[in-house]
Amino acid sequence: METIFTTENLYNILSGRIQSAFNRALLNNFKANNIGLTKEKWSILAVLWKNDGCSQQVLADETYRDKPSITRLVDNLEKEGLVTRKPDAKDRRLNLIFLTYKGKSIENTVMKVVDATVNEAVKGIDPDELRIVRETFLKIYDNLEIKK
């Protein structure tokens, strides 16, 4: 298969170099806007902003993290007053994670910074090129995803 990438460039792209640069830019933008979040904490909040009151398993599935990582992140978010755990009424072995008022109130501010960071990352790239990149990465993901 012929490719426009050198092997080194392809490895850099697929190994997460872009993700690392984006995460660094996002963290810097959070700090510049006095937002005390990491990318990991933000990813949990982003799931809850769409699906408040979900289980830790849903958070793990949606963020591609293991359960111990989710537990640590939720513990930290709880200490910061952004989320609270409540027992599931249907299955008391499960805890559901809910946003607090504080967790809900920061959504617009945080998402403005996230959107600005995304816009910074794709500045000068034609929308058609972005569509092709998205489709290509989805194909790579589908090729590698373990089918259940």
Image (cartoon, rainbow, N blue to C red):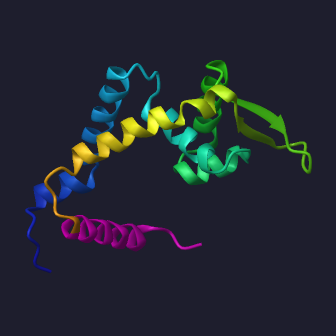
For the point 66% across and 21% down, which residue is it? 81
In the displayed structure, would residue 143 be above or below residue 118?
Answer: below
Measuring from the top left, give residue 20's x and y in whole percent: 29, 40
Query: Which quadrant holds the C terminus?
Result: bottom right
Q: Is residue 136 left or right of residue 98?
A: left
Chain part drawn in magenta: 128-148
Q: Is residue 103 visible?
A: yes
Q: Is residue 120 left or right of residue 63?
A: left
Q: Is residue 17 visible?
A: no
In which image quadrant can residue 85 be found?
top right
For the point 66% across and 50% down, which residue is it? 51
Majority SS type along the magenta span:
helix
Measuring from the top left, give residue 34's x and y in whole percent: 40, 19
Query: Which quadrant holds the N terminus?
Result: bottom left
Measuring from the top left, give residue 73's x and y in whole percent: 58, 31
Is residue 144 or residue 106 the one in the foreground? Answer: 106
Measuring from the top left, give residue 132's x and y in whole percent: 24, 71
For the point 28% across and 71% down, which residue is it? 136
Is residue 141 or residue 41 the one in the foreground? Answer: 41
